[in-house]
Image (tube, rainbow, N blue to C red):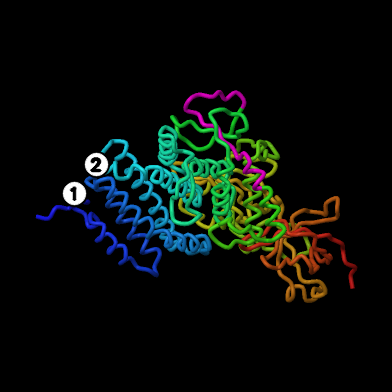
């Protein structure tokens, strides 16, 4: 019988490195989802096979990791740009990508455990231990991000494994040692940077970002991680974590006392670097050369993500504008501008009573947890509302009101029971449906033919003579004036600026003046 010096008689198709390469070469080159699914299956089977010697385990995991990278990049870009209606495809992509990060994390951590246990093969990879630990930290950070792309929750296991990886690096003295995680400049890092990327990304309140901006935020944290600060003392830090009681980043509060297992951290010089970066993107419209976001994103998304994380990295994070009060009740909610306009159902009776005369069951019923002057906290149905993302426009009607309001989803969090909790910013509690058109095209006789529906936010102009209007996405261009018809009166709208845009709406400000009747 031939002796398998590398595999040690392991009963596994990849126990021979040459055969493993042949199996990897047979992966479908033009189907990233299927390729990742097969790689995940191989990783899982290797992780479940205890007989692999450490040096061979690492060699095969490294081969599969390398084979997966381009497929994971392509599939991630497809996932982030995918229309939300494609739920089956979205679920398949998410499962393939998260499965990769989960199995790679398990594989690298198993290598670390074998090394710590002094099992056969450890001598051959002693120099590779910093790379293995740093890769483990990176794929655990990817697990954090991909859980948050679906708004959590992040399992406590992930935080425990991140803490374990960082503690090992500190104990063995290589936390700050530069390692080449992968070929190319983008692959150079340290265990400390990888650990801080995960912590500072989570500290930036990513649950308040839509998925694409969440991706940008995590990339920014990774790029700036070398400038972050970590210490066993709280000075100059904004957050902390206990390596003995692993969990996500916790905001500093007065009276936190240092102890051996606490690590204090913060943006450090990274906040100033981020501020400069925002200025450069504003001027040029693009990120500087060498700053990789993993894809081509619009200026508004990049600056929006950067400004969001800058707020939460500062020592004075955004405060609530009004007190949140516990409440109980229900909201009837409809998704998007189109369905909101249908719910408003404006009539032609020249009145401003735009309450809905149809039953509340025409929308989804959400349970209110708390209320403030600026919005609601609510629990949404478990099996419904797949359309919800941060930044989604909603029409809403409380049990106590005859009128429909308009709001934006600002925050989504899933708890351990997979129950989703949302924060809703109220744009107006009384949405007034109007008709708008490009100036000079609307008249009293042809308003229905030339105009389209929109929503007027306030009941009257503010001190500057301005009003807000929510309209179909793409209608606002910042140059052309609009005519608005309300209760048989025509108004001239002069554009001031776009407040916010979404998948199906533009929210803009206008100077308003009544037009004389012809």
Q: Is residue 294 above or below residue 369?
A: below
x 67%, y 65%: residue: 472
- Percent across and percent down for residue 65 are 37, 55
**Residue 368 seen:** no
Rendered image quadrant of residue 26: bottom left
The magenta stretch spans residue 502: no
Mark 1 Cα-neighbour bin, 10 Å: few <14, some 14–19, many ≥20: some
Q: Is residue 249 above or below residue 388?
A: above
- Percent across and percent down for residue 269 are 63, 41
Q: Secondary structure at mark 2?
A: loop
Rendered image quadrant of residue 450: bottom right
> What residue would you read off at disc 1?
8
Mark 2 Cα-neighbour bin, 10 Å: few <14, some 14–19, many ≥20: few
Which residue lies most toward the left here? 1
**Residue 1 seen:** yes
Q: Nearer the viewer, residue 122 or 372?
A: 122
Q: Nearer the viewer, residue 388 or 235?
A: 235
Q: Is residue 413 above or below residue 213?
A: above
- Region rendered in magenta: 254-274
x 83%, y 51%: residue: 462
Q: Tell me if 33 is positioned left or right of 403 in this view.
A: left
Instruction: Pick the quarter of the image with the C terminus.
Output: bottom right
CB-based contact (under 8 Å), mark 2 and mark 1: yes
> What residue would you read off at disc 2?
120
- Percent across and percent down for residue 162 are 44, 40
x 24%, y 61%: residue: 19
């Amino acid at each position: 019988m031939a002796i398998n010096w590398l595999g040690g008689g392991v009963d596994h198709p990849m126990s021979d490195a040459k055969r493993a390469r042949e199996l990897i070469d047979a992966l479908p080159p033009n189907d990233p989802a299927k390729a990742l699914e097969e790689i995940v299956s191989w990783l899982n089977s290797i992780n479940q096979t205890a007989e692999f010697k450490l040096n061979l385990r690492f060699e095969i995991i490294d081969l599969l990791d390398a084979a997966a990278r381009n497929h994971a990049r392509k599939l991630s870009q497809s996932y982030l740009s995918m229309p939300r209606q494609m739920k089956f495809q979205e679920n398949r992509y998410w499962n393939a990508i998260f499965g990769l990060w989960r199995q790679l994390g398990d594989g690298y951590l198993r290598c670390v455990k074998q090394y710590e246990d002094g099992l056969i093969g450890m001598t051959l990879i002693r120099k590779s231990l910093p790379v293995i630990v740093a890769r483990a930290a990176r794929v655990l950070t990817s697990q954090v991000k991909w859980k948050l792309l679906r708004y959590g929750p992040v399992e406590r296991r992930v935080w425990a494994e991140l803490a374990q990886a960082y503690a090992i690096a500190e104990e063995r003295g290589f936390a700050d040692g530069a390692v080449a995680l992968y070929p190319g400049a983008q692959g150079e890092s340290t265990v400390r940077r990888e650990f801080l990327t995960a912590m500072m990304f989570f500290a930036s309140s990513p649950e308040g970002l839509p998925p694409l901006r969440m991706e940008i935020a995590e990339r920014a944290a990774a790029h700036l991680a070398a400038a972050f600060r970590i210490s066993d003392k709280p000075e100059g830090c904004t957050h902390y974590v206990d390596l003995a009681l692993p969990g996500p980043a916790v905001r500093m509060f007065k009276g936190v006392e240092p102890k051996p297992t606490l690590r204090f951290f913060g943006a450090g010089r990274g906040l100033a670097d981020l501020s400069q970066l925002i200025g450069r993107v504003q001027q040029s419209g693009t990120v500087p050369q060498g700053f990789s976001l993993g894809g081509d994103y619009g200026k508004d998304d990049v600056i929006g993500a950067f400004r969001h994380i800058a707020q939460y990295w500062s020592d004075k994070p955004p405060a609530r504008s009004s007190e949140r009060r516990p409440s109980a009740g229900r909201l009837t909610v409809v998704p998007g501008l189109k369905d909101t306009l249908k719910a408003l159902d404006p009539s032609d009776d020249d009145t401003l009573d735009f309450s809905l005369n149809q039953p509340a069951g025409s929308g989804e019923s959400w349970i209110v947890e708390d209320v403030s002057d600026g919005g609601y906290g609510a629990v949404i149905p478990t099996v419904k509302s797949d359309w919800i993302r941060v930044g989604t426009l909603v029409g809403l009607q409380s049990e106590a009101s005859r009128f429909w309001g308009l709001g934006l989803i600002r925050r989504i969090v899933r708890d351990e029971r997979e129950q989703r909790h949302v924060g809703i910013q109220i744009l107006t509690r009384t949405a007034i449906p109007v008709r708008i058109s490009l100036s000079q095209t609307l008249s009293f006789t042809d308003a229905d033919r030339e105009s389209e529906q929109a929503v007027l936010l306030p009941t009257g102009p503010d001190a500057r003579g301005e009003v807000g209007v929510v309209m179909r996405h793409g209608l606002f261009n910042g140059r052309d004036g609009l005519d608005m018809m309300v209760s048989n009166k025509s108004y001239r709208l002069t554009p001031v600026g776009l407040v916010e845009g979404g998948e199906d709406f533009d929210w803009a400000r206008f100077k308003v003046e009544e037009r004389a009747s012809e």
